[in-house]
Amino acid sequence: KQEVTQIPAALSVPEGENLVLNCSFTDSAIYNLQWFRQDPGKGLTSLLLIQSSQREQTSGRLNASLDKSSGRSTLYIAASQPGDSATYLCAVFYNTDKLIFGTGTRLQVFP
Amino acid sequence: EPEVTQTPSHQVTQMGQEVILRCVPISNHLYFYWYRQILGQKVEFLVSFYNNEISEKSEIFDDQFSVERPDGSNFTLKIRSTKLEDSAMYFCASSAYRGTQYFGPGTRLTVL
């Protein structure tokens, strides 16, 4: 069964810290992997997409890496800010027509 | 910047009633999706739609659900006879190809 797991489930850090969010998937035959941000009661904002042939993608203070062979992706957030507080979701796209989501990491950055 | 829109933002209905959730995908996108998120749970795939037909559906998407693209811009999800367990946030998404999926703000469905 294709499953996606995210750890930690919750994270609370002081402003300015660099942090790493982890995503693991059971089936390494992925097509791509997408990271999202979800604010409470809101929709999903796409942050980064990594194709299966890529090792990493960067957007501003965000860097996502992909290691297919070990079934893992990490989202690195540099110099965290209170505005980064949200739930971060990892979702995997296999050679089908659906994203399979992880349970998310709830991040709180305090001033 | 183009975005996916959804209406209504919140729908309250009585059990057994029909509801239609509406979405306007990004205009040049070809792939359309519905997902749902029950409070406190994972986002779950319901159905994907391409070339005017369902390309994949989950086991959640039973005979009570249907999707339609009635014109060139709207994409709808119909639930024929709502149950209490259908209460969730429903998200529409679209993509230009089998790549980045862009999500709408969601419709919160409450079944009483």
Image (cartoon, coloured by chain):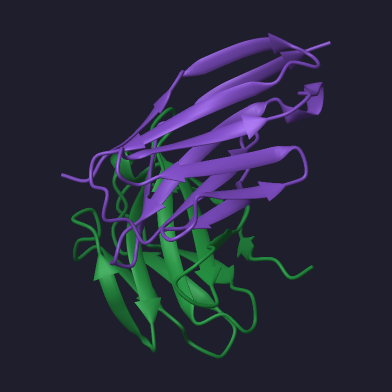
Chain colours: A purple, B green
Is residue A40 among what the camera can see?
no
The quadrant in which the N terminus of chain B is found is: bottom right
Vertical placement of A28 versus A31: above or below? above
- Quadrant assignment, res A35: top right
Vertical placement of B53 versus A1: above or below? below
Vertical placement of A103 versus A69: above or below? above
Vertical placement of A48 versus A70: above or below? below
Looking at the image, which is closer to me, B112 or B94? Answer: B94
The quadrant in which the C terminus of chain B is found is: top left
Left or right side of B92 for B53? left
Q: Which residue sits at x=68%, y=10%?
A: A13
Q: Which residue sits at x=30%, y=53%?
A: B16
Image coordinates of residue A66 in percent, x first then y, are: 46, 44
Left or right side of B67 for A49? right
Farthest residue to the left: give it: A1
Q: How many marks do you count on the picture? A: 0
- Quadrant assignment, res A1: top left
Image coordinates of residue A33 in percent, x first then y, are: 45, 52
Looking at the image, which is closer to me, B18 or B87? Answer: B87
Farthest residue to the right: give it: A111
Is residue B33 among what the camera can see?
yes
Q: Which residue sits at x=39%, y=89%?
A: B51
Image coordinates of residue A36 in percent, x first then y, are: 57, 44
Q: Which residue sits at x=67%, y=17%?
A: A108
- Quadrant assignment, res B35: bottom left
